[in-house]
Every structure is written in C-alpha cells, then in structure tokens.
Amino acid sequence: MTYPRIDPNYNKTIAALNYADTAAKKSTASSVFSDLLQNAVGAIDNQQKKGSMEDIFNTAAQKYNIPVNLLKAVAKVESGFDANAVSSCGAQGVMQLMPGTAASLGVQNPFDAEQNIMGGAKYLSQMLDRYNGDAKLALAAYNAGSGNVAKYGGVPPFKETKAYISRVLDAAGGDVSASTDQLSELSSLMTNTLPGTSGLTGLSALTGSPAAGTSGTSYTYDDYLMFLQLYIAQMQMNTTQMMSSDISGLTSSDTADTGGSMSLL
C-alpha cells in the first residue's frame, strides 16, 4: 500500500497563507478607514468654505437690496450650498446658474462661490424688480424662466415650480445657514459607523476605543494627524453650535421684549 507523502513545508505554507489573509484584512480595514479620513478632511475644508459663504450672502444681499434669507434659501434649495453642483440640465454652482445666464451676469467662473452668489443675487434682484417685489413670481422666473411666467400670466402650472416656490419660501422663513448644514454633515461623519469595521465610528477612533474586530489594525503617523484634525473640527463644531444657540436665544429674547417682528418679503 502506498501512503500519500506529507509535504514537509505544509506547516510553513499554512502559516504563510494565514499571514497573507491577516495582512489582507488589515490592509482592507486601513484602506476603508483612510478613505473615510480623506472624506472627513474634505468635509472640513468644505465646511470652512461654506462657512465663509455667510459673508458673501450678506454682501450680495446688501449690494442688490434683497432679503438675505431669501437669497440663502434659493441657494439651499438650488444646490445645498454646493459650489461644485451641476444639475442634469447644466445649471452650475451655488445658485445653479445656466451658462448663458451666468455669462450675461458677468460671472466668469460659475464654480467660484463668490462670483456665483453675486450673479445669482443680481439675477434674483432683477426678477424682483420686474415683478414689483412679488417673491413668488420672481422665484417662478428663477426656476422656470421669465418666458413661462409671461406665457401663463403668473406662476406656471408646473408641479416642480410650485414645489420650488414653496420650499424656498419655507426655508426663507426659518434659519438658513450655509455653515450649519456642513456641521451636520461633519457630525454625521464623526458619529456614524465606519464601513467594514464592525462598529468603529470616527469618534471612537479619536478616543482610542475601537470596536471589536479592529484591534491590530495599524495606522500611519499621517493617519493620527488626521485624527487630530477631526478632533479639532469636532470641538469647533460644538463651539459653533453652542454660540449659535446662545445668539438665537438672545435674539428671541430681544424680539419678545420689543414686541417687534421682521418680515423677509
């Protein structure tokens, strides 16, 4: 009888396969986490850019004599304050200007937030002037074109346009803030579970409390620098939210004391 021969390198082969499998898992976990870190840092950059939009909105509203909350509401509904947004029909930037419209308004780079917002504010001001301050007609023209407003003698009977006007006016009546939306996105990145890590969140990574199944995953020096950036961003986010809450409380108190009110439109 012939017996199968045992490979003398069998144990070494198995050990090598196990090592390769473990290394692959570590590499995958590190790659997933590295990608999330890059996305988070990108969100921080976007937050800073969008936070600075507040000044641009204020300047544009003053220059073209339009309500700042109406201008920001249009931006929120149009693009969610995304300077790089491009719609299916080709509208571009924060205020979603069509290339021809942008050019007529003097906007050379529609993806430059300041140029785009200034152009959108100018156009919205023109529409308000054309329709004697009627915000609904101005918004209808912004969304569907002044030609359709003229054609139908008022707000066009388009479901999209009617919904658009309602959404913008609802947003204009509340607190519209470019930076707050980004803070919410960053907060989500910090607290949501990282994909492929069995429960590890951005915040638990910062505090050094990884979930089960992630121990043994090694991170680079650059990774830890990113951890620190995320932690700082989280602290800034918390501080900004606290300040916004305090300011809102003071504003409400002042309004209550004076009995006054402000109308956007």
Image: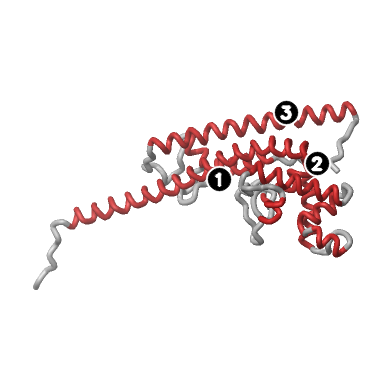
Is 199 situated left or right of 184 in this image? Answer: left
Work out whether 140 lies above or below 231.
below
Which residue is drawn at the image coordinates 89% and 27% (left, top)? 258
Sequence-first tag of 1 and 2: 2
Identify which residue, 204 or 257, lies in the foreground.
Answer: 257
**Residue 42 in the image, given as x and y percentages of width and height:** 53, 43
Q: Nearer the viewer, mark 3 or mark 1?
A: 3
- Distance, label 1 to label 2, CA atoms, is 39 Å
Q: Which mark is residue 192?
A: 1
Identify which residue, 184 or 8, lies in the foreground.
Answer: 184
**Residue type at numbered disc 3:** Asp
Residue receiving disc 2: 66
Residue receiving disc 3: 246
- Distance, label 3 to label 2, CA atoms, is 27 Å
Is 199 situated left or right of 173 in this image? Answer: left
Identify which residue, 168 or 220, lies in the foreground.
Answer: 168
